[in-house]
Image: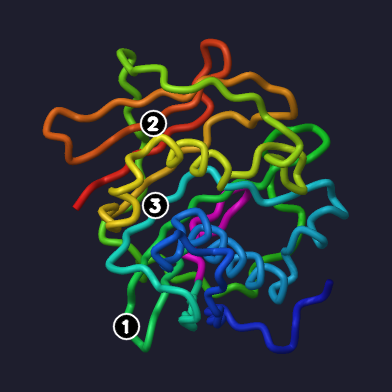
Amino acid sequence: MPISPNFTSVLSKDWEINFTQCTPNGYLKYTDLCNLLQLTAAAHSEVGGISFTDMQEFDQAWVLSRMRVEINALPKWQDVVTVKTWINSLENSRSVRALEMYLNGKKIVGSETYWAVFNTKARRPEPLALPYEHFELFPDNRATVEGFSRININPEKESVFEKTVYLSDLDIVNHANNVKYLEWCLDHVDAKRILKQEVKSFEMNFLKELSLNDQVVIHENDNEDHSATTFSITKGDKNCFALELHWK
């Protein structure tokens, strides 16, 4: 699709929270929070002419490599939130995108995301084939207090669950959707901690893609002062994903 006449380098989009996106206490699930952030990023890439449809002409797609989310509060059922997004950096095969969520004009969530251009046939990163110079970059306008980092995976981690990747776990790029990794891990967190909204922030590293029928193991490890919990997902002896939850 061509660049939209309504294109701007900073995009804001409103979303109404529906009941399918909520936990039993009526507040937005962390997985659906990530979905709303990513849908907003996708909307911005669409009006900017670098969407999945545009990129598929060159067998390319954006895939998420790292993501950090800092949470002050969660919206609840029927709230209307505004998600704002802009790009910090974009060159060759890599991009850092910022996202913020607002409720009644107050910022409640900040997120920093790191994306790579992925060739969906060759299954490897490569430079973006489309023009992107029309995007103004905002390298100093950060959405989070801390940037994303490489998560340290403790080799003494405990195995908590074995999982097979099913068709329902896959997305349009034909690999396990990034939110699925988060969902698999959160299923092994004490439900009371989730319902009490004790998650202050979380960070995800996507290390290797997973495909249909892959057999994986989910591992868990608490840090010494119990202020954070780290999950990792392995296939064979390879780490595929890491999640670090920071508690209030």
Q: Earlier in the sequence, mark 3 or mark 1?
A: 3
94 vs 138, left or right, is right
Rounded to the nearest whole Å, what is the CA distance between mark 3 and mark 1?
Answer: 19 Å
Task: Name the residue: 35% across, 45% down.
Answer: 191
| Residue at image mark 1 | 106
Q: Give coordinates of residue 53: x percent, y percent.
A: 82, 61
Residue at position x 35%, y 34% in the image: 151
Circle 2 residues within 10 Å: few <14, some 14–19, many ≥20 = many
Name the mark on residue 231.
2
- Secondary structure character of the magenta stretch overall: strand
Residue 225: which quarter of the image?
top left
At label 3, counting other C-alpha atoms closer than 10 Å, the crowd grade (few under 14, some 14-19, many 20 or more) is many
Q: Are marks 3 and 2 in contact (CB under 8 Å)?
A: no
Q: Residues within 10 Å of mark 1 (few under 14, many from 20)?
A: few
**Residue 95 is one of the magenta-drawn residues:** yes
Residue that label 3 marks: 68
The alpha-carbon separation of the residues under discs 2 and 1 comes to: 31 Å
> Residue 13 location, x and y as percent?
56, 81
- Along the line of sight, which residue is nearer the eye, 212 or 122? 212
| Quarter of the image that includes the N terminus | bottom right
**What element does badge 1 sit on?**
strand
Residue 137 in percent (x, y) is at 50, 70
Magenta residue span = 86-97
Q: Residue at x 72, y 70 (%)?
A: 46
**Badge 3 amino acid:** Arg
Measure the C-alpha gap from mark 3 to mark 2: 15 Å
Residue beneath the point at 30% across and 58% down:
197
Q: How many marks?
A: 3
Residue 41 magenta-highlighted: no
**In the displayed structure image, the side of residue 78 where residue 222 appears, left or right:** left
Q: Secondary structure at mark 3?
A: strand
Q: Amino acid at mark 1?
A: Lys
